Amino acid sequence: MSRQKFWRQIRLPRFAGEANLPDKTYGQELSYCKLRFMTKTVLLSHELIGEKMAGPGIRYMHLARVLAKHIHVVLAAPTGSGPTPTSATFEMRSFERGVWHSIADLLADADVILLPPDLANEFPQIADLPGSIVIDGYNPLLAEWLYSYDGLDAWQQRMAQLRRQYFVGDFYICASERQRDWWLGQLEVQGRINPLTVRADPTLRRLIDVVPYGLSTQPYTGSAPSSPIMRTVWPGIGAHDPVILWGGGLWPWLDPLTAIRAVDLLRSRLPDVRLVFPGTRHPNPNLHGLHTHLDAARALATERGLIDRHVFFGDWVPYERWADVLRESDVALSLHFDTYETRLAFRSRILETIGAGVPVVATRGDATSEIIERFDIGATVNLTDSAATADALQRILLRPRSEMQTGFAAAQAEYAWERSAAPLLNFCRAPQHAADHALTRERALSTDHDALLKKNVEMQDLLQRYENGRFMRLMRRLKKRRD
């Protein structure tokens, strides 16, 4: 019998270093039980992990590092991800999206399985596993998907696929108290807020809690890199030019055009100002078809005579050099529109900017703008106000960093990854099923889209037969009257 099969049968939690132990007899294996027991937690990332990563992949890598200090962690990422980082204290595995046998053995004996909503639909078999399931709802996909669908038919199909997440989870995590309120509403509609879950915990923190995107100051505390990444490397960006960093993508709910107009106003006051969009091409090829503002932004910068002089567009920066990009930036910029997505968003790249001690100018309205105001580490502006944005950028560029040092220290302490991940770590140390687990897992196993479509067809057929029967009865009554 293999060591893995042995542990699966007795269902004892893992302990530190178990994955690297040589094969042993049962007696030798059990002697290691004197060590501190650790549960096995598997984090399933729907995004690639490797040289080029987006926010979700970065989040899972950091969560894995924090959790691995206390429990046995495996980080699984889609095929195409890079090798395990050299500094990793966790195991890495790969899987194929939607292919159950590529991941079944890894999950079979997991005590905790953490996954985003999409993977709950791609792997419905997870609902039938004995481990506790954590749904990571930090990225409100529903709000982003609204920009990908024009018709209701495709949208309703997508929503049907989303339903499983509401029933499969034993514990849910999100990025902010705003998101938690939204999630509580979603869970209430699906029947997850009920006498069983409320009796287990009247606060419902055992059902859903806040695990925000965290930050780390470690990458920015060492010496400066030996070679620059933007300054004097990108033609047109000098060693001492004021650099404004647009840290995120160019998604439909963001407002890079106001940023470009603001720089157009600002260049008469600060002739050497430079606005950099370093990440215009998402590393996940599945997202390359999603609409962005890239073409409109390039066109506007060209029209204003800013392209490659005051406004610069890159491709995607390798994550290992992202800290260097932040070191070379003087201020970060995060602008958005007033949308449904804005209300729920938690801008992950802005947290990394705060970790680096770079001040931020942001549009009011999302959760991260409240962090900037609360700790006085930048400035906030009204929606689409290019003049106010230009004024705020100038003010922050001229303000000494030392005046914001206390605010940065407080924000960095509050949003440190170790603190952000605490509710998740507590659950993984003592995993449990939700109070209504027996009821919800049955529903999770029966909410696949094909079954829903079949049920819908059956209902329509039943209605049609009913209508046909009523029509026939009416015809018989009319015939009797004629006779």
Image (cartoon, helix red, strand yellow):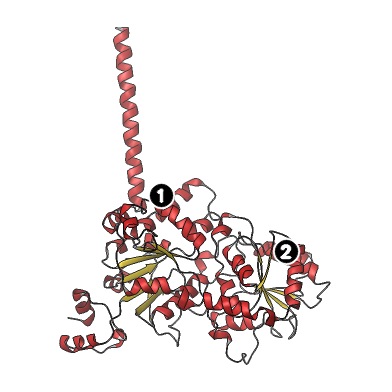
Foreground of the two, 452 or 218: 218
Foreground of the two, 456 or 79: 456
Mark 2 residue crowding within 10 angstroms, few (<14) / some (14–19) / many (20+):
some
Mark 1 residue crowding within 10 angstroms, few (<14) / some (14–19) / many (20+):
few
Residue 322 falls in image quadrant: bottom right
At which x and y percent is residue 275?
A: 71, 73
* Mark seen at residue 299: 2
Residue 384 falls in image quadrant: bottom right
Q: At 34% from the left edge and 32% from the top edge, which residue is drawn?
A: 464
Relative to residue 273, is residue 168 drawn left or right?
Answer: left
**The residue tagged with tag 2: helix, strand or loop?**
helix
Is residue 44 shown to the viewer in this render? no
Mark 2 vs mark 1: in front: 1
Foreground of the two, 42 or 207: 207
Give the distance between the C-alpha atoms of the residues marked 2 and 1, in whole angstroms: 44 Å
At which x and y percent is residue 350?
A: 59, 72
**The residue tagged with tag 1: helix, strand or loop?**
helix
Relative to residue 376, is residue 80 drawn left or right?
Answer: left
* Mark seen at residue 329: none
Is residue 231 shown to the viewer in this render? yes
Q: How many marks?
A: 2
Specify the amino acid type for callout 2. Answer: Ala
Who comes first in sequence, dot 2 or dot 1? 1
At which x and y percent is residue 310?
A: 76, 74
Q: Check the picture and name the quadrant holding the N terminus.
A: bottom left
Q: At 26% from the left edge and 57% from the top edge, which residue is drawn?
A: 438
* Mark seen at residue 189: 1
Specify the amino acid type for callout 1. Answer: Val
